[in-house]
Amino acid sequence: MAAYNPADIFRKKSGSSLSSAPDSFRSPGVTANPFAKNLAPTGPRPSAPAPAPVSYGNPGGGGPGGGATAAPVAPAAPQMSFDDFVAKDFGYTQTKNENSRRLQDYDAETLRSQQETEAEQEMRRAALDETLTTMGGDWANDAANRGVLRSGLYLQGQDQVDQQGVEGNQDIDQLLTNLISQRQGGRVQQEATNRGALNDVLSQLSQKFNSGLAIS
């Protein structure tokens, strides 16, 4: 006796082959994991494209290809300072040189005068010493002839000779003192004159600098 097979009953009722099983008997398909993350592919991100150069339309071109790329703007030149402005002026440099020359000429001239005065002093002192020596000798001889060489009268006469020598030397010293005072005062005046001339040039240059005029 043949074995019982439940599939025979199904085959008889449906008249279909076992190769065509009902949908309820089919194995469900494999589904994706609902807990899996949708990860993006890893790797370096593409960089943004460089901006296109700015172009301006050509008024005479008339077409899209008539534009020209804008040239880079040059940086502004640094502004010249007033000191640099003055240093480049020929008139200022010339005035400074003239002031220096005038002061050197004054120093040389007054130094020569001082040297001449010092030489004159030496001659006057020599002449004064000779005069005082002669006066002292004459007075001593006169006192000896009169027999008063050891008296107070002789000493009084000698004091007069000495006093004349002191006064004579003071006069000689005053020659150089006066010259040195004049020399110093004249130099101060010359320096003031030089400053005035230089200030006049600086005043003119200041006006030019403020008005933006170029060096002439």
Image (tube, grey):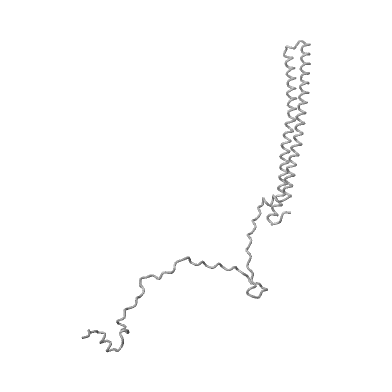
Q: Residue furthest left?
A: 1
Give the quadrant of residue 65. Answer: bottom right
Q: What is the x, y in percent for residue 179?
A: 74, 33
Horizontal and vertical percent position of residue 129: 76, 21
Q: Is residue 133 above or below residue 95?
A: above
Q: Is residue 65 above or below residue 100?
A: below
Please give the name of the residue rendered at 74% of the width and 25% of the height, measured from the top-left corner: 169
Residue in the picture at 76% in, 26% down:
122
Residue occupying the point 28% across, 87% down: 11
Residue 41 picture location, percent across and down: 44, 68
Front residue of this view, candidates 117 and 212? 212
Figure quadrant of the C terminus = bottom right
**1 w.r.t. 94: above or below:** below
Left or right of 139 on screen, residue 55: left
Q: Say which quadrant the N terminus sits in.
A: bottom left
| Residue 55 or residue 11, whichever sits in front | 11
Instruction: Using the image as rendered, state which of residue 203 and residue 99 is in the foreground.
Output: 99
Q: Position of residue 15 (x, y in %)?
A: 29, 89
Farthest residue to the top: give it.
147
Count of labels in the image: 0
State the image quarter where residue 186 is shown: top right
